[in-house]
Amino acid sequence: MPKGVGVRWVRIGILVLVALFLVLPNDAWAALEDPIFRHGRLEVRALLRAGGAIGYVVIALSIAMVALVVEHVLTIRRGAMIPYGLAEEVHKLVSAGQIVQAYEQAKRYPSFLGYLLQSGLQEAQYGHDAAEKAMEDTAVEQAARLSRRIEYLSLIGVLGPLLGLMGTVWGMIQAFSEFAEKANPQTADFAPGISEALVSTFFGLTLAIPAQTFFAIFRNRIDEFVAEASLLAGHALGPLKKRRP
């Protein structure tokens, strides 16, 4: 998938959220003031209302997180990073001394393994050691690029609890401000602020937990596929050891 696709998905998700926010009818907003639980059932719209402004920020980040996860699922997988049969095909061509043909074959697969093979074959004329060094450098570069892409999930996972904490503090400020406005505030007067505080914390955790989970999954995938691709690339260019530079 092209590099800018993930960013476009994030923008599209935020635009969809804004559009829904603008087109939601007034009577629907009135319904959001209903209790969060009614007859033992969760009222989603009331839950969103209780989260306040920070709740909508968390929802926007949730949409961004889903878009990033979808992109990474499509791109950080074995089939995309290590095309089936590519290493074997290149190995056969290199064994036959067809370096140019091997390079063209690797170039047909713009993938992690394909980039490793291309860099190694470009240095094949200087010997196996030079080709191996080129592949090592490319592996480090490509792995770092993949790691930077999934860092956005880690960032969202960190922002989730912080936003939840901000909402909690703001909700408690609202709750205790009743003392300044009313001489004898009742329990019901504190309820909206406390509700917003707790719901904000809930929103922050529901954002952070999946974001950090997927970040760990994709990070482990990258480590696994990078190691596997490096081994396959080294094997594919193994016949270069028999050639003199």
Image: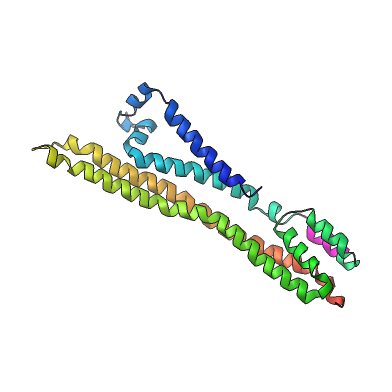
- Look at 65% across and 53% down and name the residue there: 77
Find the residue positioned furthest to the bottom: 244
Look at the image and tell me in which quarter the C terminus lies.
bottom right
Q: Is residue 177 above or below residue 30?
A: below
Find the residue positioned furthest to the right: 96
Q: Quick one: 57 or 76, which is closer to the camera?
A: 57
The answer to whether residue 70 is left or right of residue 45 is right
Bounds of the magenta span?
84-93
- Look at 90% across and 64% down and name the residue there: 98
Find the residue positioned furthest to the left: 183
- Look at 52% across and 52% down and name the residue there: 214
Q: Position of residue 197 (x, y in %)?
A: 29, 44
Q: Is residue 86 magenta?
A: yes
Q: Quick one: 57 or 239, which is closer to the camera?
A: 57
Q: Is residue 88 above or below residue 12?
A: below
Residue 85 shows in the view: no
Q: Position of residue 193 (x, y in %)?
A: 24, 40
- What kind of colouring is applied to the model shown? rainbow
Question: Which secondary structure dominates the residues rendered in magenta?
Answer: helix
Q: Is residue 43 magenta?
A: no
Q: Position of residue 80 (x, y in %)?
A: 69, 52
Q: Disc count in the image?
A: 0
* Quadrant in which residue 149 is drawn: bottom right
Residue 161 shows in the view: yes
Q: Position of residue 41 (x, y in %)?
A: 36, 31
Q: Quick one: 100 or 230, which is closer to the camera?
A: 100
The answer to whether residue 27 is left or right of residue 17 is left
Q: Quick one: 82 or 11, which is closer to the camera?
A: 11
